[in-house]
Image (cartoon, grey):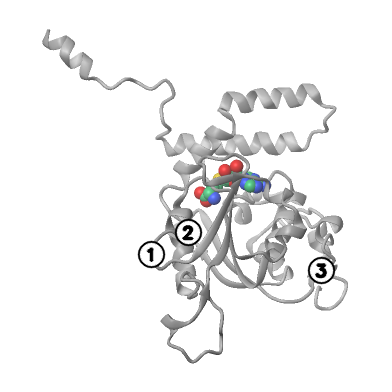
Amino acid sequence: MGKSKSKSKRKPIPLVRPLKSRKLARTITTQFHVLTHARSSLPPSATAELKEIDDKLEELGGRKSYQEASQLNTSVFSTSKWVVGRLGAMGILEGKVLEETSTKKPKKLKRRPISVLEVGCINTQLQDASRKPGVRMNVRSIDLRSTSSQVEVADFNALPIEEEEERYDAIVCSMVINCVPTAVSRGEMLTRLRRFTKVGGVVFLMLPLMCVNRSKYLDKPGFTGMLEDLKFEVREVKETPKILFYTLIKKEGDVFIKPQWRKVKERKGGGGKKYTGNEFAVCFEEAAVEGGGEVKKGTNNEGG
Ligand SMILES: C[S@@+](CC[C@H](N)C(=O)[O-])C[C@H]1O[C@@H](n2cnc3c(N)ncnc32)[C@H](O)[C@@H]1O
């Protein structure tokens, strides 16, 4: 009798257990990247190979499982908390001052809410922060797959440029560029981060440190140089043992991309043991960067 009572009190075992191991989570995200990146290098005619990859992705649990693994991977550090802290330090969390020259006390100044775009959103932390008293920001969150009613399904690299041009005071792009499958689409993403931000606006860009310190193609000074070529002021670079955080301010003016960033080339020592662990590369294709007429070839002295 006593036995059956304790049995009935036992919690039911879920069919799909929530992911708890960070090691397993890292394996899932790495596998997902390897498969999606391999998939993007195949032509549509390679039906057998594409099917094989799709089956493997399904076995892994697809984007849902990938997002759950990412949630666990990033749970130790709240990117949103850090972003909110930076916006607060910049004095724009309570909105942007409309009359810059006013002599009124800071609290009395007229402000408009800031517009924020969160790219690749797997939690509602930033949305939640926007509803806190005193905070004046309108957050739009997008992802290829939505995990909440507050997240819109949209591909950042497919948003209509004319509608998005200089629309946001801040864009948060945390751990997304490393998921984008090709060097050209990463170049496209960086170009769009610039285009969609207002002049003087801020881009918070985060990526795994290994993308720039273990890659065959790119090192940190090179990646930072690309961001500077895109006419971003690199306001702050923060590094944890695993993640690189950039705070970038959009400067006014034409963009000159150096010719070296228009093709993917192994860096010196790239064939060596040290740099074989990562394939991260960024490439600015003529068509992609010159779409808006604002990015020019680096053929003059400024561009090198
Ligand atoms: C590694 S998770 C990072 C999530 C979150 N930003 C963070 O820092 O914890 C990457 C997310 O970006 C999304 N993503 C990848 N490419 C995207 C794109 N082109 N447009 C929108 N979201 C994208 C993925 O679906 C995934 O949910």
Q: How many marks?
A: 3
- Up-down: is 118 above or below 253? above
Q: Nearer the viewer, mark 2 or mark 1?
A: 1
Question: Of label 2 and label 1, which has the lower sequence position?
Answer: 1
Residue of label 2: 240
Q: Which residue is drawn at 73% across and 48% down?
A: 158
Residue type marked 1: Pro
Q: Toward the viewer: 119 or 56?
A: 119
Q: In this view, does 24 lie to the left or right of 1?
A: right
The nearer-to-camera label among 1 and 3 is 1
Residue at 88% from the left image edge and 72% from the top image edge: 299
Q: Nearer the viewer, residue 240 or 42?
A: 42
Residue 57 picture location, percent across and down: 62, 28
Residue 246: x %, y % from top left: 57, 64
Mark 1 vs ligand 1: CB below 8 Å = no
Q: Is residue 273 visible?
A: no
Give residue 270's position: percent from left, percent from top.
71, 52
Q: Position of residue 220 (x, y in %)?
A: 63, 62
Cα separation between marks 2 and 1: 31 Å
- The reply to whether residue 134 is in sight is yes
How would you rate the neighbour count of disc 1 (Cα within 10 Å): few for under 14, some for 14-19, many for 20 or more?
few
The residue to which callout 3 is attached is: 294
Instruction: Decide if residue 55 is on the left or right side of residue 116.
Output: right
Callout 1: SS: loop
Q: Which amino acid does label 3 sit on?
A: Glu
- Amino acid type assigned to the residue bearing label 2 in the image: Thr
The quadrant in which residue 254 appears is bottom right
